[in-house]
Image (cartoon, helix red, strand yellow):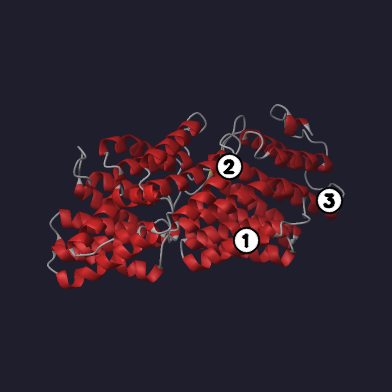
Amino acid sequence: MTAAASGPPPGPVGHHRDLQDCERALVAAAARYGREPGEEVVRACIAVLESLDTLGPASHGDAGIDTAADSLRVRTLRVLLCASELWWRDGDGEGTIGVEPWPTVPVHTLVAQAEAAAARTADPALRAAARHMAGQHLVVTHSLDAALTALTAAVELAREAGDAFTELEALTDLGHCTVGRDMKLGVGMLERAETLASRSPGSFRHPEQAELLPMTLARLTGHIGVAAFDRGAFDAAEGRLRESLRRLSPRNTPGPYAKMTNFLGQLLTAAGRFEEAESLLTEAVGRLAPRATASTHQGYNLGLLGKLYLEWDRPEQAAPPLLAGWDQLRAAPHVSLLPLLRNYLGELLMHPAYALRDVTRACELFTETVEECRRTGFQRSEIAALMLGARGAMRLGDPRSALGLSDRAVERLAETGEMPALRSEEVYLTRYEILLSAGGQEHAGPWLDRARAVLLAKGRTIADPAARDAFYTRVPTSRSILAAGGQRGHTS
């Protein structure tokens, strides 16, 4: 193993003598991913890239050597982006990586370098790897549609090239992102990825792929768990998410670990297991606190901790982590996460027990989310904002707007089908309550029946009676649905 991969941060530019030395350093860096802190892997990869810059094009015009250097550049950038996920940024559309002692480097520049180098090689496998990197970047910085286009191309190119590892890696992300657009299609993609993983590549096009495979499999397991949660299958989802977390390392893979922690925190909160969610998220926030002053993942976990306290009916406890998470995400934005936290902030401002309650401002935030999500394509937050805006309009004494917003919420839900982590039962309950308050009793009842049916279906996926009871009795939406159903003569 080279000094760049095993010892202190690599030395000056040109540390690696030739392409063979660069290749050895790259494989050594990939072997450290998941076993040692990500910062060290990033430093080792940057040393390889700097060496490639110093070596430059072959002076004798040997196209084969130039192609080998471009191949190494794409492969090194793949490892670097995997290891640096925690530090990705999106300032004015330019994600950045900053790991001392190197200055901040824009992620979009690294992705562009990978795509340019891959194009020069004309190797479909390398082009697939570069397109996969582009898709990962676009889902953070631009829109769901742009990310889906890039990830679809990555899967097709990898399959064409017979690169099973890159196909698995890209299909894992494509399936996860597609769930946000089409649940059935996305789940099918994740099932295809799992089938591909079960045939675990017997051979790899490049040696570092074997080192990256365990983390790819851990992410796939987690994404399958998220899809199960989205479908309302609580026990299956929890099992997969916990398995994923067991394979990840909070110290060495902090980005993926923080993401899976957040998904599990969402599930525990949605299930009414507030104490468990609080312990999990508090630990996750504490682990990242010394490492990232402005992190997308830290911002999201802080925001979800605030949402947990809102569900727990503790608005004053919710405010500090929620506001801190909002500040983190504005410093390190993510186009799918900002609307989620904006909606949580609106919920805080609408809470009747919150000292700084401001329903008008909350409704403004919901309007911002709807407009933003129409541009970026993240439908879950759009539907939630329409639903929450309907509640806000009702509290402001504007039943006409409330009816219109709740109508749009159920229409959008009908168009999209089930949405990731969006409580359909809450959308239906809101429609019921608004119709009822507007005097439309004859039209309101079926919406309550829908809400109750979804709620009970989710409850049946929880095997433990005590956990099922917590879901029914501790979650405010569940209590409201069952109480309203009892008034209508339903029995559970």
In primary-sequence order, the first of circles 3 and 1 is 3
Whether tag 2 and tag 3 are in contact, CB under 8 A, the answer is no
Q: Position of residue 109 (x, y in %)?
A: 60, 48
Kind of residue sitting beneath label 1: Ala
Label for residue 65? Answer: 3
In primary-sequence order, the first of circles 2 and 3 is 3
Give the residue displayed 59% in from the left and 61% down from the top.
151
Give the vertical position of 19 relative to 197 (above or below). Answer: above
Give the residue displayed 40% in from the left and 61% down from the top.
379
Give the residue displayed 71% in from the left and 53% down from the top.
117
Q: Secondary structure at mark 3?
A: helix
Give the vertical position of 59 relative to 160 (above or below). Answer: above
Q: Residues within 10 Å of mark 2 (few under 14, many from 20)?
A: few
Q: Residues within 10 Å of mark 3 (few under 14, many from 20)?
A: some
Give the vertical position of 122 relative to 265 (above or below). Answer: below
In primary-sequence order, the first of circles 1 and 2 is 1
Give the residue displayed 39% in from the left and 48% down from the top.
467
Give me the C-alpha separation between circle 2 and circle 3. 42 Å
Give me the C-alpha separation between circle 3 and circle 1. 34 Å
Is residue 309 found left or right of 82 in the rendered image? Answer: left
Kind of residue sitting beneath label 2: Arg
Residue picked out by circle 2:
246
Q: Position of residue 83 (x, y in %)?
A: 62, 41
* Front label number (1 vs 2): 2
Q: Secondary structure at mark 2?
A: helix
> Can residue 137 be spotted in the picture?
no
Between 153 and 204, the residue placed more toward the observer is 204
Q: Residues within 10 Å of mark 1 (few under 14, many from 20)?
A: many
Residue picked out by circle 1:
193
